[in-house]
Image: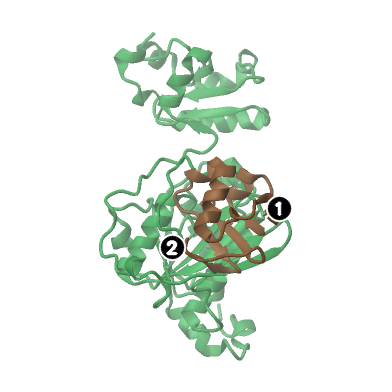
Chain colours: A brown, B green
Amino acid sequence: MNILLFGVTKDIIGSPSLSIPSTAFSRNDAPKTVGELREFLEKAYPELQNLASLAVAVNNSYAEDEKEINSFDEIALIPPVSGG
Amino acid sequence: MSEDGRFIRQTSLSQFGAEGQRKLAHGRVLVVGLGGLGLPVASYLNAMGLGTLGLVEQDLVELHNLQRQVLYTEKDIGKPKIEVALERLKAQNNQTDFIVFDRFLTKDNAIEIIRDFDIVVDATDNFPTRYLINDTCVILGKPFVYGALHGFEGHVSVFNHAHGPTYRCLFPTQPDSESIPNCDAHGVLGVLPGIIGTLQALETVKLLTGIGEVLSGRLLLYDGLTQATNSISFKADPKNKNQTKLKPSYNFVSCPSKDTITINELMSLLKTKPQIIDVRTEAEYQSHGLKEALNIPLQQLHDELKVIDFAKPVYLICQSGQRAKMAYQELKKTQPKAVLYTVLGGMANIPLHASTN
């Protein structure tokens, strides 16, 4: 699963993208929805929990937590940014 | 000056034409913030023949603005941005009708200021103002052109255009000031606001003239390091479109520049024995001064440089902040590498009993 990182998520995770090999999950605990992916990432990177608004896009469309995902989807994490 | 042919290079574009020019000339656009994003927006809209250009800004030009705010020069340091910008923009195009607001946008003035414009350009650098602009535009039914930066990255969208989504449809909850860098605390490569601000100017022209496809319902993500762009589509959530009142609070926090600190911050530093220079007169210092401070009146500063240790941070304080700023400018000239801070508000903000020596 490939995850593109934007704004402060890039700084929190420390790279512009994150590739999670399917071997990272045992058979039944791979995230099946956006909400489950959020939980997985927040556990791995607790600082993400501090973001009041963190938009998730699946294949370049904004996605709600119920949206189902699979390992071929391209995910993007988009927090608001404030600089000007 | 003859106006014949002034805009010929754009009116000769068949999709734009005299009709596009006429629409621009009738357009009323408010640019909130005259920093890295706002200056290219204002400059291009003004150059292209916008009818009415509103400007909102209350900051002064500071040295560390110059790497990205390219309309300002070294001679402008310490002057109000709105005055400097107005003078330059008038010289660029004297036909524009300028309306200046020498203040920051607040919950109390936002409706009144935004009401008379067709389009708002959000060229600010903090979340409270961005959410305030969103909510005000939703209430008044106006589109706003959004641009924001993070490091080498820029985000652009047009919110609240017709039935299109709002800022809150993408980011429902305003972040608190701690979780995400605010107030430029995170650093911005000088050229980046030029790119993003110019894209905002383009979207504004498209909104006014109806050419092309407005970036509504899409968030453009631009990465300057890789020249990669991503476009994320998103939809309106009706509850965000039906807002009728501003929120009770937008949690405005003052955004001090990196070269200023507040009295409270200074007080919390006192146990670390900071190097504080009080640049008021000796009499002022004697009547109400910090015992931790060294008194060097502004007029003598130039002759007393040896007394200051420029290897350590220097905190400049005066009565209200003005003389500290002048001292800052003077010291920066001879000590460009020194770490200097001015204390916001100065001794006027310290109660007499709490601090006298």
Is B61 on the left-hand or right-hand side of A27? Answer: left
Task: Name the residue: 46% across, 83% down.
Answer: B23
CA separation in Å, label 2 and label 1 = 37 Å
Where is the N terminus of chain B found, in terms of image quarters?
bottom right
Q: Secondary structure at mark 1?
A: helix
Where is the C terminus of chain B found, in terms of image quarters?
top left
Chain assignment, label 1: A
Task: Name the residue: 44% across, 10% down.
Answer: B291
Q: Are marks 2 and 1 in one subunit?
A: no
Task: Name the residue: 61% across, 13% down.
Answer: B307
Is B66 on the left-hand or right-hand side of B123? Answer: right
Please state the horizontal and vertical placement of residue B55, each as a whole percent of the image. 43, 60
Is B130 on the left-hand or right-hand side of A56? Answer: left
Q: Amino acid at mark 2?
A: Tyr
Looking at the image, residue B221 lies above or below residue B80: below
Q: Residues within 10 Å of mark 2 (few under 14, many from 20)?
A: many
Q: Secondary structure at mark 2?
A: helix
Q: Nearer the viewer, residue B357 or B202?
A: B202
> Residue furthest toward the right?
B226
Is B345 on the left-hand or right-hand side of A47? Answer: left
Q: Which mark is residue B167?
A: 2
Q: Nearer the viewer, residue B289 or B153?
A: B153
Q: Is residue B289 visible?
A: yes
Q: Nearer the viewer, residue B32 or B216?
A: B216
Please state the horizontal and vertical placement of residue B248, each as a whole percent of the image. 26, 50
> Residue furthest toward the front?
A27
Q: Nearer the viewer, residue B113 or B171?
A: B171
Please state the horizontal and vertical placement of residue B285, each as a whole percent of the image. 41, 14
Q: Amino acid at mark 1?
A: Thr
Q: Which mark is residue B74?
A: none
Looking at the image, residue A81 lies above or below residue A57: above
**Residue pointed to by mark 1:** A23
